[in-house]
Image (cartoon, rainbow, N blue to C red):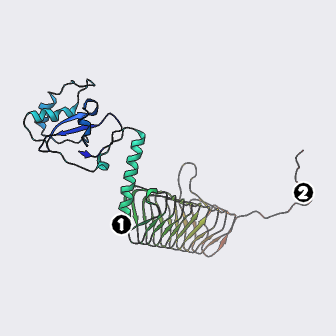
Amino acid sequence: MAESWTAKSSLLKIVKKNENGLAISIVEEKDASEEDKKIKEIFTGILCCNKKLLEEAISEVNNDNAASEFYLTDIVSIINTKGFRINTCIVPNDEVKGANTKEELSELEGIYREMKANDLLNMGITISDPSRVDVRGDVSAGKDCFIDVNVILEGDVSLGNNVSIGPNTILKDVEIGDNSKIEAFSHLVSSKVGNNCSIGPYARLREGSYIDDSAKIGNFVEVKKSTIGDKSKVPHLSYVGDSSIGQDVNISAGVITCNYDGANKHQTIIEDGAFIGSDTQLIAPITVGKNATIGAGSTITEDAPSEKLTLSRKKQKTIDNWKRKKKQ
């Protein structure tokens, strides 16, 4: 049962009690007298009863009411007339409040959001604005974590110590290590981020992404089903898919691991210490050796050996006496 309600619809079921505080009947609001409507206790729809007694009471339910409907709640008065005690349990309104309109559903969502935000605060997490954090799963956190506005936490989310989550970020089924920072507008799903990492802003980690300690995934970078090794960097504007990236690797702007041939996915392996120049396409399956360098603007279709520079470019040329066409 719930107390202190405010009528917004004709669907309320009022609990009437005797002088001993035992329930004697449940009355639909449309059938209630003015005196009944002064009662501030309603039925929440939860009832526990002996099966045999319930079956007997149901067989006696009739539709002698204003709506000519059969009300299951009439079993309370039927059971009462048989001499049985009917106890009630008072619970907070917010735990049992119903929703019959979109407005009421939105109100319930707000209550739930506040409850979940309070859980985070009680863990010791600092939240920029508790009214603008959505928790849609289970969250665990270490010490001194911070969550900015408009963050969505879904599924199982684990935050280490001193983790910072920037605004407008979505985390779903992720684990984030100590001292890591997730910048604004990033989207992480089914991924694991190590300690001392920097992710974003505007980064996307898709399913199966593993970012090892002290790695950096920068703005407008997408990682899918890949491992990024310790201290490796993918600073901006790149796609890394189905790849194994070693330690201390630098992947420059605009690099694409071309993992899909139209039918199957293939793996790219980049070994420790490699440097991949800007605007490079690595056509998988392919391996870039340890400490190898790939020249900017290259399309690499074969394995690149360790400790060497590999590039693929046509020789630049300048055409004399050439004139750009002009609009007529």
Specify the quadrant of the image occupied by residue 161: bottom left
Residue at label 2? 322
- Mark 1, Cα crowd under 10 Å, few <14 / some 14-19 / many 20+, is some
Would you place residue 75 above or below residue 64 in this image? below
**Looking at the rendered structure, which numbered label has been put on residue 202?**
none
Specify the quadrant of the image occupied by residue 19: top left
Quadrant containing the C terminus in the rendered view: top right
Work out whether residue 307 can be spotted. yes
Residue at label 1? 123
Which residue is nearer to you in this view: 211 or 200?
A: 200
Residue 205: image location, x then y, percent: 51, 59
Q: Residue at x 37, y 60 (%)?
A: 118
Which residue is nearer to you in this view: 321 or 305?
A: 321
Mark toward the start of the polypeptide (2 vs 1): 1
Amino acid type, mark 2 = Trp
Amino acid type, mark 1 = Met
Q: State the SS at label 1.
A: helix
Would you place residue 211 above or below residue 109 in this image? below
Q: Is residue 29 left or right of residue 260?
A: left
- Mark 2, Cα crowd under 10 Å, few <14 / some 14-19 / many 20+, is few
Quadrant containing the N terminus in the rendered view: top left
